[in-house]
Amino acid sequence: GLVGDSVNLASRLEGLCKYYGVSVIIEQEAAFAPAVQSRFHLRLLDLVTVKGRTQATELYQLLAEKGDLPDEFDAEEDLQYFIGGFAEIHRLYRSKSFSACAEALKQYRQQFPQDTPSKMLLRRVETLLNEGLPADWDAVHKLTEK
């Protein structure tokens, strides 16, 4: 039932932390729960379907409580670009603006070279640019591993 599905998703999200190279991932329902966005810095991570589900789920990286600047950022502006820049990159990706998306990702990766999600998305975009857009393409990344 529903509880089983939630537990299943939570288990998948825990496993995805390693895949994306981040500490904490929450899904869209949790991200938009009361007080979450006003209390925490969240970065849009990906739009996926996880194994065992057909519905697309938006994933967010929980970075820190607002008011706390995570150690890896020198300034609040860096954190804002880390969050807002990646949201804009996803907007370009989802609107099929792949060339602009690739350029934005390269610029983003100059500032955040250790960031795994942007590296993964750049690989996806470069594949689409090199091989063309499949007829059935959508912006949802299908995850096949548990």
Image: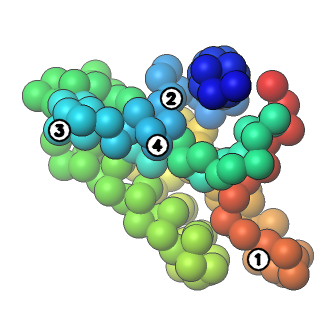
Cα separation between marks 2 and 4: 10 Å
Q: Which residue is mark 1?
A: 129
The image position of residue 142, as x and y in percent, is 78, 49
Can residue 69 be seen at all in this image of the molecule? no
- Decide which of tag 3 and tag 4 comes sooner along the chain: 4
Cα separation between marks 3 and 2: 17 Å
**84 in relation to 79, above or below:** below
- Decide which of tag 4 and tag 1 comes sooner along the chain: 4
**In which quadrant is the C terminus drawn?**
top right
**Left or right: residue 16 compared with residue 35:** right
**134 in relation to 118, above or below:** below
Q: Which residue is mark 4?
A: 28
Q: Are marks 3 and 2 in contact (CB under 8 Å)?
A: no
**127 in relation to 19, above or below:** below
- Residue appearing at x 44%, y 39% in the figure: 29
Cα separation between marks 3 and 4: 15 Å
Residue closest to the eye, 116 or 27 = 27
Which residue, as the protein is rendered here, is positioned at the far left?
67
Can residue 138 be seen at all in this image of the molecule? yes
Type of the residue with mark 2: Ile
Within 10 Å of disc 3 (Cα), the crowding (few <14, some 14-19, many 20+) is: few
**Label 2: element kind:** strand
Q: Which mark is residue 25?
A: 2
Which of label 1 and label 3 is nearer to you? 3
Which of label 2 and label 1 is nearer to you? 2
Q: Which mark is residue 112?
A: none
- Residue appearing at x 28%, y 25% in the figure: 64
**Label 3: element kind:** helix
**7 in relation to 108, above or below:** above
Q: Which residue is mark 3?
A: 38
Type of the residue with mark 3: Ser
Cα separation between marks 4 and 1: 29 Å
